[in-house]
Image (spheres, helix red, strand yellow):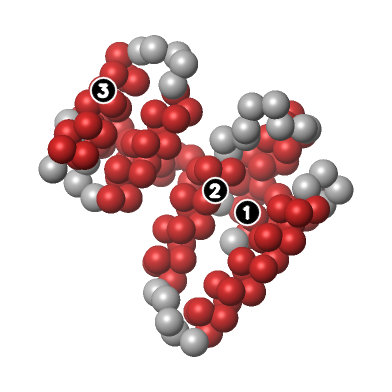
Amino acid sequence: MGVFERYYASQSELNEAGAEVWESYKRQVLGLLAAKMVKKSVIAAGLEQGLRELREFPPGAKQVGPAAVALERAIELEYPEFLREDEERLSKALKRGSIRTEREYYLVRHAIDREEGSPSDRLAALYKLADNFDAR
């Protein structure tokens, strides 16, 4: 949650609507946690996926450069192991040649989205992993 806090605080002038959505989401999450309606691990997995998606700025988005820099800085300060752990998980799935969990599947899909448009052997391997998982 610290990454989102830091990021939206730094982007308040550029993305007021995003900051409002974050504040609303944060209140909901804290309420669910306080009521013990959701496990922390479920919230953490959702936040990590949200962070991956936030790193994919839409084409033509205003202020992509400063926003991307602010996001990467927030990750560096609040959750530096995030990118390293994602890459390790992805490498293990590629080496193993299969996806074991839904979480790995979303990680692979995210990597495909980030690497699409730059054909490579790695991208082909990622597609194969996702296709095999989808076929199950």
Residue drawn at x 80%, y 53% is 16
Viewer-proximal residue among 47 and 76: 47
Quadrant of residue 2 in the image? Answer: bottom right
Residue found at the far right of this picture? 13
> Picture coordinates of residue 64 (x, y %)?
72, 31
44 horizontally vs 68: left or right: left
Compute the Cα span from label 3 to label 1: 31 Å
Q: Is residue 126 placed above or below 98 in the rendered structure? A: above
Quadrant of residue 22 in the image? Answer: bottom right
27 horizontally vs 47: left or right: right
Quarter of the picture containing the C terminus is: top left
Label 3 or label 1, whichever comes before in sequence order: 1
Label 1 or label 2, whichever comes before in sequence order: 1
- Which three-letter amino acid code belongs to the residue tagged 2? Leu
Residue position marked by numbered label 2 in the rendering: 51
Q: Is residue 111 placed above or below 46 in the rendered structure? A: above
- Which three-letter amino acid code belongs to the residue tagged 3? Ala
Callout 1: SS: helix
> Picture coordinates of residue 12 (x, y %)?
82, 52
Quadrant of residue 9 in the image? Answer: bottom right
Residue position marked by numbered label 1 in the rendering: 3
Viewer-proximal residue among 129 and 97: 129
Viewer-proximal residue among 79 and 125: 125
Residue position marked by numbered label 3 in the rendering: 125
